[in-house]
Image: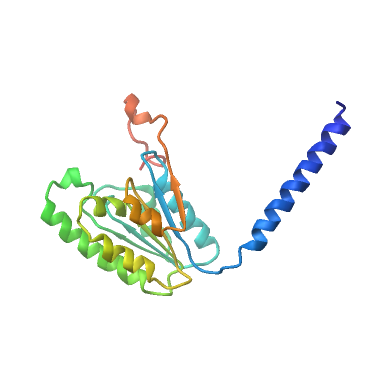
């Protein structure tokens, strides 16, 4: 087969694909915020969420970020958001990982306080995007009532989008979410004895 034939077949294939894609775009007529749930045991859930933060900021949107367990160590995103960007309201629970604190009552109190901040953002239509990073741990350990959490997410302002990250989370979050992505671990450097790297892992 000549290069001319290969190029023509490629062109025809791409034309058919464009027609299918254009038809799907035309079918999408609902205009509202979305609930994105990023779960799974692999690395990259929070990183994906913060990628959406950058997208939103690129459009001049207002963003709220709540981090439920990454609060007792420095991370690149917390340094950037807290010190460099005025269009992001950033709140950390402050207790760190549950296996670090080992104090259930303290963790529950901190989770409830943090959820109050999150609830205010989720009821404020000035926020275009709200990130609830590692929320699933709070539900898995029963620090927060799943029904109350789902009710607030469900009844947020119609134009507001929300992203929840974390392992697990159960069928209720998956059922309510508009988009669900599962990050699967294939390999992880930490399991080979490589320390977490600032800018990559932290």
Q: Name which quarter of the figure residue 196 lies in.
A: top left
Q: Name which quarter of the figure residue 188 lies in.
A: top left
Image coords of residue 88 (percent x, y): 41, 64
The residue nearer to you, when weighing 88 against 111, is 111
| Residue 135 visible, this orientation | yes
Residue drawn at x 42%, y 75% is 125
Image coords of residue 124 (percent x, y): 38, 74
Image coords of residue 104 (percent x, y): 13, 52
Residue drawn at x 50%, y 62% is 57
Image vertical order of residue 40 relative to residue 2, above or below: below
Which quadrant, please, contains the N terminus? top right
| Residue 164 visible, this orientation | no
Residue drawn at x 13%, y 46% is 102
Image vertical order of residue 102 relative to residue 156, above or below: above
Image coords of residue 144 (percent x, y): 22, 59
How many badges with numbers are in the image?
0
Image vertical order of residue 77 relative to residue 12, above or below: below
């Amino acid at each position: 087969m000549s290069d001319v034939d290969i190029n023509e077949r490629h062109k025809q294939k791409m034309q058919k694909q464009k027609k299918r894609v254009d038809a799907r775009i035309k079918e999408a007529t609902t205009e509202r915020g979305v609930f994105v749930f990023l779960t799974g045991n692999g690395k990259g859930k929070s990183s994906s969420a913060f990628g959406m933060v950058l997208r939103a900021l690129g459009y001049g949107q207002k963003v709220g970020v709540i981090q439920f367990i990454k609060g007792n160590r420095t991370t690149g995103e917390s340094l950037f958001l807290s010190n460099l960007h005025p269009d992001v309201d950033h709140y950390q629970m402050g207790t760190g990982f549950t296996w670090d604190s080992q104090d259930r009552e303290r963790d529950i109190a901190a989770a409830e306080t943090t959820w109050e901040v999150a609830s205010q953002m989720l009821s404020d239509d000035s926020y275009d995007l709200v990130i609830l990073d590692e929320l699933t741990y709070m539900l898995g350990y029963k620090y927060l009532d799943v029904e109350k959490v789902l009710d607030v997410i469900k009844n947020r302002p119609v134009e507001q989008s929300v992203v929840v990250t974390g392992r697990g989370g159960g069928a209720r979050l998956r059922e309510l979410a508009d988009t669900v992505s599962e990050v699967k671990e294939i390999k992880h450097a930490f399991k080979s004895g490589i320390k977490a790297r600032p800018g990559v892992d932290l």
